[in-house]
Image (cartoon, helix red, strand yellow):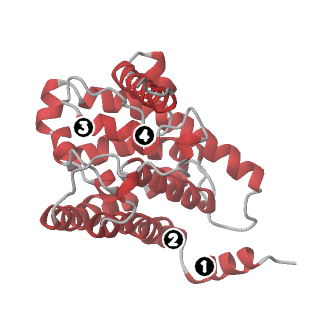
Amino acid sequence: MATALEKGWLYLINNFTDFQLASIGSFIIHESVFFLSGLPFIVMERLGYQRQYKIQGKVNSVAAQEKCVMKLLIYHICVNLPLMIVSYPVFKYMGFTSQLPLPSWNVVCFQILSYFILEDFIFYWGHRILHTKWLYKHVHSVHHEYATPFGLTSEYAHPAEILFLGFATVFGPAITGPHLLTLWIWMSLRVIETVEAHCGYDFPWSLSRYLPIYGGADFHDYHHRLLYTKSGNYSSTFTYMDWIFGTDKGYRKLKALKAAEHQYEYVEEKVPKAD
C-alpha cells in the first residue's frame, strides 16, 4: 500500500519531467526553505524579540536588511537558478533519478551525513582561501559587509563566491547521483544549517549546546566580528577542521576567558563580604 509521501511523489513525476523537478522544483524548494527560515530573524531583530539571546548588541538598520533581501533575490534568480538548470545533465549522467521507488531512509540518512562531512571539508579550504588578501578584497568582502549577521546574510555574497563555495554543496550529490528526494532533503537541511549559523542568536536550544562538534551561530558569529586576517572559524557545519588546523584558537581563547569571568563572578556572589 502506497504511503502519503509515495502518492504525492507519484503526482509529481506524472505531471512534471525530471528536468522540471530537478531545476525549477529545486529552486522553489530552496527559496521556500531559505526565506521561511531566514525572515523570522529579521522580524526578531526589528522587534527586539528574544534580545537576551542575541550574540551582538548591534542591530542592523532597516535599510541594510532591505538591501540584503533585494540583492539576494537578484543573485538567486540570476545565479542560483541558471546553475540549477545547467547542472542537471551532470546529475543525470551520474545516475540521478526522481522515479519510484523512493530510497530507504537508511540510504537517505547515510548519503546526507556523507554530504555534510564532504561539504564541510571542501568548504573549509575554499573559505580559508577566500580569506587571502586579494580574494577577500575583491570577492569575499561582500559577504562580510554584515559584521552583525542575520539569517538571510548566509547567502549574501559575490556571485563568484556563490559559484565557488556552492561547489562544496553540490559536489557530494553530483558524484553520487542521488534520488531527487535525497537531494531536496539535503538542500533543505544545508540551507537551514547555514541560516542558523548566521542568525545572530545563541538560544538555549541551539544544537551547538548539545552536539560539541557542531559550530552554530556563536561559532560563526565570531568569524564575522573580526578582521579577515584574524577571523578563523572557517568551517561551515562542524568545528573539527578548525580545531585540527588551529584556526579556532582565538575563538577558544575568548570562550575560556568568558568562562573564567563568569566563574569569578559566581564565586564573588557566593563568598560573603567581611564587615
Question: Residue 49 placed where, x, y %?
Answer: 36, 66
Of the two numbered discs 4 and 2 in the rendering, the one whose residue sits closer to the viewer: 4
Which residue matches tag 2? 21
Quadrant the N terminus occupies: bottom right
- The amino acid on which the numbered mark 4 sits, given as a three-letter code, is Ala
Q: Which mark is residue 12?
A: 1
| Marked residue nearer the N-terminal end (1 or 4) | 1
Spatial CA distance of label 4 from label 2 is: 22 Å
Q: CA distance from mark 3 to mark 1?
A: 44 Å
Residue highlighted by disc 3: 225
Mark closer to the chain start, 2 or 1 = 1
Amino acid type shown at disc 3 = Arg
The reply, left or right, for residue 163 in relation to residue 252 is left
- The residue at which mark 4 appears reads as 168
Give me the residue at 42% from left, 33% from top: 235
Camera-side residue: 96 or 232? 232
Between marks 2 and 3, how big is the CA–CA gap?
A: 39 Å
Foreground residue among 215 and 163: 215
Horizontal side of residue 184 vs 64, given as left or right: right
